[in-house]
């Protein structure tokens, strides 16, 4: 058995920086990755999808060129093979940077293979057994495929990974799932020229969002020609001469939608079912996520779980923050807790949605007195100048403490502008301090103090 001071299982967003902090502290570390360095974000998540979002935006803007007084001769055509090649290059370069980073870590041993626990202090990788007093699980998630969905075994379908392998634009893409992954791919391929239908079981898209945000997103997508079917209670996949069909039970619209391709985007599941966690005594919840406490420690001393597999976040930035929490507590004598971070995320359709903290619905459910302020993007100068006025801004605050509880910015630059509110909430800055800020003109962010100043009791 080879022994180390620490073993890190998985080279996603939390694994490599954690290995870096530990080796900088003079520890020996084994980092085990079964497939590709960089994890979901680098290989099949943020980087390739946002690269394709950028290509789709370029196509969309080219079609709107006349709106800006720009004349293009000829039709706008998308070369999907080149789109794929561009995103492949971005992924390959990013993965190469991770490899170079790891190669420079003195005291790191990088192993390629599938790690399985044999006990609480050792794992097997192929023919090798590795031992360490500290083990960190960073294995991420994969697309969920429900065995109970009728027809799932009769129709070929795509997921977020195989969508990126397409080098031709689908004739008609059927997207099952109306949340982040599904909606981003829906708009991407609509802008590439595909016909697109989104099918969602819930009454609204992005079910966790407020109804006004969900309906605004629906309006944005439908304005581009995407068909949206919500309230699809009974979804069934069926073979069809066009390629595939999805049967739905909706109050409005035909009961069956045929298409050339099906994208299944109905959630994620953790990659924990084949790690031998039972041999280490590590507890998981009913969905397979590793159970952790506020410091991201499992129920077994000496074992932590970081990143998406712990169920405490589902984003690259939360995975990175997991690493920061664990490293600070172990190496810096800190006592940081997961509950201290302010939740924030974005939906990268165009225009994007930036979200932080509570929704208005969640805030109302607390029973506390509230202040709510809104502003349509039609009254945001930067949006008017860019000719991109879809969406709105909304901020919710506690009427008594004057603390900001949450906000949504659906509009051009919303994914960037939301960070002013993320920072304010993280620092505990109240509404009145934000109102006194003097932001730069012309920006989207400059309207945040205006929205706060116009908040009304609800």
Image: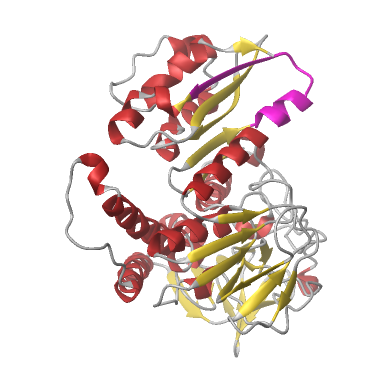
**Along the line of sight, the residue nearer the viewer: 230 or 414:** 230
Relative depth, front residue between 113 and 58: 58
The residue segment tinted magenta is 358-375
Residue at point 54% right, 42% down?
Answer: 219
**Residue sticking out furthest to the bottom:** 127
Residue 383 seen in this snapshot:
yes
Decide if residue 8 is in sight here: no
- Quadrant location of the N terminus? bottom right
Horizontal and vertical percent position of residue 248 = 75, 64
| Quadrant housing residue 356 | top right
Q: Position of residue 432 (x, y in %)?
A: 50, 9
Colouring rule applied to residues = secondary structure
Q: Relative to residue 128, is residue 71 depicted above or below?
A: above
Q: Is residue 227 left or right of residue 99?
A: right
Decide: is 306 above or below 333: below
Q: Residue at x 35, y 67 (%)?
A: 87
Count of marks overlaid on the render: 0
Q: Quadrant of residue 193?
A: bottom left
In the rendered view, does 233 fall on the left or right side of 11?
A: right
Q: Residue at x 41, y 26 (%)?
A: 378
Q: Is residue 317 magenta?
A: no
- Seen in the image, is 196 located left or right of residue 145? left
Picture coordinates of residue 121, whole percent (x, y): 69, 70
Q: Is residue 221 above or below residue 29?
A: above
Which residue is depicted at the point 74% across and 24% down?
364
Q: Quadrant of the C terminus?
A: top right
Q: Residue 396: where, in percent of width, then height?
A: 61, 22
Q: 330 or 32, which lies in front?
A: 32
Q: Does the magenta portion include 367? A: yes
């Amino acid at each position: 058995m080879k022994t180390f001071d620490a073993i890190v299982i998985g080279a996603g967003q939390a694994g490599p920086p954690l290995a870096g902090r530990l080796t900088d502290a003079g520890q020996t570390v084994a980092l085990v990755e079964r497939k590709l360095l960089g994890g979901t974000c680098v290989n099949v998540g943020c980087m390739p999808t946002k690269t394709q979002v950028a290509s789709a935006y370029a196509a969309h803007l080219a079609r709107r060129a006349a709106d800006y007084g720009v004349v293009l001769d000829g039709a706008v055509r998308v070369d999907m093979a080149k789109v794929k090649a561009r995103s492949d290059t971005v992924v390959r370069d990013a993965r190469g940077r991770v490899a170079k980073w790891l190669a420079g870590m003195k005291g790191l041993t990088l192993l390629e293979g599938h790690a399985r626990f044999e006990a609480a202090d050792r794992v097997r990788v192929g023919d090798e057994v590795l031992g360490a007093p500290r083990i960190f699980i960073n294995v991420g998630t994969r697309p969920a495929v429900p065995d109970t969905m009728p027809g799932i075994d009769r129709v070929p379908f795509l997921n977020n990974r195989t969508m990126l392998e397409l080098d031709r634009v689908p004739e008609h893409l059927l997207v099952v799932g109306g949340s982040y992954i599904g909606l981003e791919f829906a708009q991407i391929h609509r802008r590439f020229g595909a016909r697109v239908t989104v099918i969602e079981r819930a009454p609204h898209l992005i079910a966790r969002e407020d109804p006004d945000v969900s309906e605004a997103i629906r309006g944005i997508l439908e304005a581009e020609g995407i068909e949206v079917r919500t309230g699809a209670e009974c979804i069934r996949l069926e073979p069809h001469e066009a390629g595939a069909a999805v049967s739905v039970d909706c109050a409005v619209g035909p009961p069956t939608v045929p298409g050339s391709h099906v994208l299944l985007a109905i959630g994620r599941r953790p990659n924990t079912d084949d790690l031998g966690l039972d041999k280490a005594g590590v507890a998981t919840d009913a969905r397979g996520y590793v159970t952790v406490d506020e410091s991201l420690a499992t129920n077994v001393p000496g074992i932590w779980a970081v990143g998406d597999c712990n169920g405490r976040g589902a984003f690259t930035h939360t995975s990175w923050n997991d690493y920061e929490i664990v490293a600070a507590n172990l190496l810096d004598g800190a006592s940081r807790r997961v509950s201290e971070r302010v939740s924030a995320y974005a939906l990268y359709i165009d225009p994007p949605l930036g979200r932080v903290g509570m929704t208005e619905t969640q805030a109302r459910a607390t029973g506390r007195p509230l202040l709510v302020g809104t502003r349509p993007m039609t009254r945001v100068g930067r949006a008017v100048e860019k000719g991109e006025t879809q969406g709105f801004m909304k901020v919710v605050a506690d009427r008594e403490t004057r603390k900001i509880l949450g906000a949504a910015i659906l509009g051009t630059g919303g994914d960037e502008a939301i960070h002013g509110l993320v920072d304010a909430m993280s620092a505990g800055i109240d509404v009145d301090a934000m109102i006194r800020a003097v932001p730069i003109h012309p920006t989207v962010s400059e309207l945040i103090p205006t929205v706060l100043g116009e908040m009304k009791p609800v």
